[in-house]
Image (tube, rainbow, N blue to C red):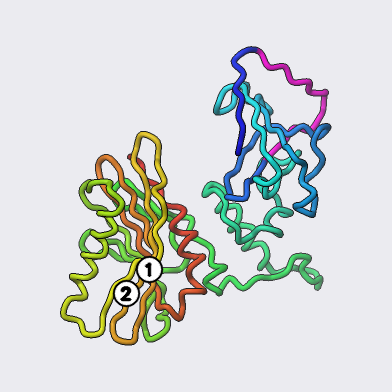
């Protein structure tokens, strides 16, 4: 459990002249915290996770910022919460990406991660072998996201670089140029509807009933809810629900990754589809896209 104590009085930090200031800590859930980690009290992040200090402390003020997001504060993180930290950097470093490239991390670092991936594939000059191993960016699991987000209503989401975008009615369809197994083209649907009651069981039933109606009269068809997350509350705004579903028509089974974002004005839907045979390659890419969904209400 992260423990925070906010000090409203004067907080004096002894900073030696010329001493390097830095500090970033990333939890095992991918949440990042930037502030000051005292290198005199905390050693560099060890190679072995079992050697991470029992407690790592991060404080504000930090660098030129007099007050942090919670004023003058001190945060304490327990070793079991910590994935990685740095006492002298304030963003994920090459060392971090080399170890945790495919792990979840806050959306604000996705562009830096994609730049690192591209860097792995840059041609080296002078006849020397690259120091870093190359990765196959043509693999969907390694595909980077477009730097340009697709907007729908007051929401936006980043999508796989190189995929095509078209608009059908009030639905934005983002498709891979080449088809997958059985000719089914992996795709993402984005759309919004008028505000719906934020009742999770009823909402899941709404999704199920809508798809059941679409499949009515289609022989050998069915729809399943495979997973449903607990609601993720967005303070004073609404909440999000993640779903994993599958629909079957004949011998074709299509997997879908969904997010329903309930907000005051509208309800926003993200749905990413792929043939079940292609799912293992595309699931992490779809999750990466879903995690970039932002609603500006």
Q: Image point 65% across, 70% down: which residue?
A: 135
Q: Is residue 111 above or below residue 281?
A: above
Crowding at mark 1 (Cα within 10 Å: few <14, some 14-19, many 20+): many
**163 or 222: nearer the viewer:** 222
Q: Secondary structure at mark 2?
A: strand
**129 or 49: nearer the viewer:** 49
Q: Which residue is mark 1?
A: 256
Asked if one can make out residue 244 in the rendered structure from this viewpoint, the answer is yes
Image location of residue 243, percent across then percent down = 38, 60
Pointer 1 and pointer 2: residues touching (CB < 8 Å)? yes
Crowding at mark 2 (Cα within 10 Å: few <14, some 14-19, many 20+): many
The quadrant where residue 169 appears:
bottom left
Q: Image point 36% across, 76% down: which residue?
A: 254
> Dividing the image into 4 quarters, which one contains the C terminus?
top left
> Dividing the image into 4 quarters, which one contains the N terminus?
top right
Image location of residue 166, percent across then percent down = 30, 66
**174 or 184: nearer the viewer:** 184
Q: Earlier in the sequence, mark 1 or mark 2?
A: 2
Single out the residue that lies furthest toward the left. 217
Chief secondary structure of the magenta span?
Answer: loop
Residue 277 within the magenta-colored segment of the rendering: no
Q: Which residues are magenta?
A: 10-24
Q: Is residue 294 above or below residue 17?
A: below
Q: Which residue is mark 2?
A: 247
* Residue 1 relative to residue 206: left or right: right
**49 or 37: nearer the viewer:** 49
Image location of residue 271, percent across then percent down = 35, 63
């Amino acid at each position: 459990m992260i423990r925070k104590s906010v000090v409203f009085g004067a907080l004096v930090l002894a900073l030696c002249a010329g001493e390097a200031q830095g500090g970033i800590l990333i939890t095992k859930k991918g949440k990042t915290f930037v502030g000051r980690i005292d290198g005199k009290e905390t050693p560099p992040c060890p190679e072995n996770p079992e050697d991470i200090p029992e407690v790592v402390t991060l404080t504000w003020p930090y660098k030129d910022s007099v007050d942090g997001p919670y004023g003058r504060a001190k945060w304490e993180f327990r070793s079991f919460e910590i994935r990685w930290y740095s006492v002298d950097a304030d963003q994920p470093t090459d060392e971090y990406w080399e170890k945790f490239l495919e792990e979840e991390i806050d959306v604000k670092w996705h562009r830096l991660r994609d730049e690192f991936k591209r860097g792995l594939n840059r041609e080296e000059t002078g006849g020397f072998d690259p120091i870093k191993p190359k990765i196959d960016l043509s693999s969907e699991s390694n595909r980077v996201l477009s730097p340009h987000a697709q907007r729908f209503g007051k929401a936006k989401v980043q999508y796989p670089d190189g995929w095509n975008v078209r608009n059908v009615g009030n639905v934005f369809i983002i498709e891979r140029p080449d088809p997958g197994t059985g000719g089914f083209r992996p795709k993402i649907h984005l759309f919004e509807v008028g505000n719906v009651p934020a009742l999770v069981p009823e909402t899941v039933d709404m999704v199920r009933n809508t798809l059941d109606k679409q499949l009515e009269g289609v022989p050998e068809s069915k729809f399943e809810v495979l997973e449903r997350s607990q609601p993720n509350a967005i303070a004073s705004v609404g909440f999000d629900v993640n779903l994993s579903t599958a629909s079957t028509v004949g011998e074709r089974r299509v997997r879908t990754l969904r997010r329903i974002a309930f907000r005051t004005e509208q309800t926003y839907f993200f749905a990413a589809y792929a043939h079940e045979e292609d799912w293992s390659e595309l699931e992490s890419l779809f999750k990466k896209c879903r995690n970039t969904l932002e609603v500006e209400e």
